[in-house]
Amino acid sequence: MNVKKAILASMIVSSMLVTLAGPIPAGAEAAQEHQQEQQQSDSKKVPIDKKLVPKLQKAVKQFAGKEMKLQDVGEFDNEARTVVEVKSEDGNYRAYFEHKSGRIWGVSGDTTIDKIGKKDKDEILEILKGMYSKKTYKFDKEVVMYTNYDDKNEKLTDHVTYQLRGKDFTVSLDTWPQDKRLYGVNIRFDKKELDSKLLKTAAEAVKTALDHEFDVTEAALVYTGDRGNSWVLEDDNAMVYVEAKTGKATNFYHHARKQVTTNKVITEKEAKEKVAPIAKELFNIDISKSEVKWDSLYKDYCFFIQNKGTVVRAALDADKNVVYLKSGDNASHGGDGV
């Protein structure tokens, strides 16, 4: 998990960067790691439509206060590959737009901690210590600033979000004209710091959902407000969310698999047969009699129960392996948020 990238992307949609892995011959680890990272990066690259460039440059100019040239190629910025990030040539500014429609969602750039008031910083530190008191928290000087963009009127909005960082943590401060709220509070951990029960729970759940032998390489505790905190655990190929309070796994992702893009490959009936027993075991949700709908935007299967809405969402590969499996809010709206 690239934590800086993930939390910045959560300002728009959740995002996790992943690398593909496999057995590595002795002496070839570094070369293969570079090759895998390059292949994964290449698969996310998106050429920028020349017709969209002036519109993107206008948005970035409003944010930066000056003309900025943009790179010719962007990258998908979320798991569902619906949002694209394009950087300025100097890498200091970034614009985010919807791949299919070209709608611009926002612009981000680098600023300093001086933008954040003492009251807000004190509140953030209090939350961090409340989440995990055994770490020391100190802010870095650099802060990322993200501003929403009104695509219809082609202007920046007053809705600003700041991303603050420090050793082992990242925080997003969402600033409205009349209000402020924290989200995306993220504390990183080494595997050796994690409870053995958590590791066992995650491994068993990932085996059930993805049929994958899970071995945590990166971990983060994420603040989710009144819902309680959640763990985000990841290895080279998979990721899982686990509620800290209940110990329940709620969302699963397999980064190395490629989801089908049409329901002609796997029918809704076949998808239900695959997902129903998994959803029952992991979420205690019975979708055996639910209505199944194909979501043409996210290219996945939505399991709908009357008066409850979409309770489970899943993407499958051509071999009917689970690419991702979501419950709760992510099942409902298709996002990847914790």
Image (cartoon, helix red, strand yellow):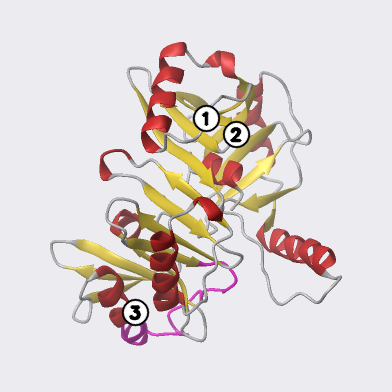
In the image, residue 331 sits, relative to residue 73, either above or below, namely below
C-beta proximity under 8 Å, tags 1 and 2 = yes
What type is the residue that disc 3 sits on? Val
Q: Position of residue 186 (x, y in %)?
A: 48, 40
What type is the residue that disc 1 sits on? Thr
Read off the magenta span. 254-275
Q: In which quarter of the image is residue 335?
A: bottom left
Disc 3 versus disc 2: nearer the observer: 2
Q: Name the residue under label 1.
A: 136
Q: Which residue is drawn at 60% across and 44% down?
A: 5
Residue 100 showing in the rendered view:
no
In the image, residue 125 sits, relative to residue 303, either above or below, namely above
In the image, is 143 to the left or to the right of 194? right
Task: Judge the density around disc 3: few (<14), some (14-19), many (≥20) Cα neighbours within 10 Å.
Answer: many
Q: Residue at x 74, y 66 (%)?
A: 36
**Mark 3 → mark 1, Cα distance in angstroms:** 43 Å
Residue at disc 1, secondary structure:
loop
In the image, residue 71 sits, relative to residue 291, either above or below, namely above
Q: Where is residue 264 in the image (x, y as percent from the top left)?
A: 45, 84
Q: Mark 2 points at which residue?
A: 167
Q: Quadrant of residue 29?
A: bottom right
**Mark 1 → mark 2, Cα distance in angstroms:** 8 Å
> Of label 3 and label 1, which has the lower sequence position?
1
What type is the residue that disc 2 sits on? Lys
Q: Does the magenta stretch include residue 273?
A: yes
Task: Judge the density around disc 1: few (<14), some (14-19), many (≥20) Cα neighbours within 10 Å.
Answer: few
Q: Does the magenta stretch include residue 135?
A: no
Disc 1 versus disc 2: nearer the observer: 1
> Of label 3 and label 2, which has the lower sequence position?
2
Q: Name the residue under label 3.
A: 275
Q: Nearer the viewer, residue 218 or 171?
A: 218
> Of label 1 and label 2, which has the lower sequence position?
1
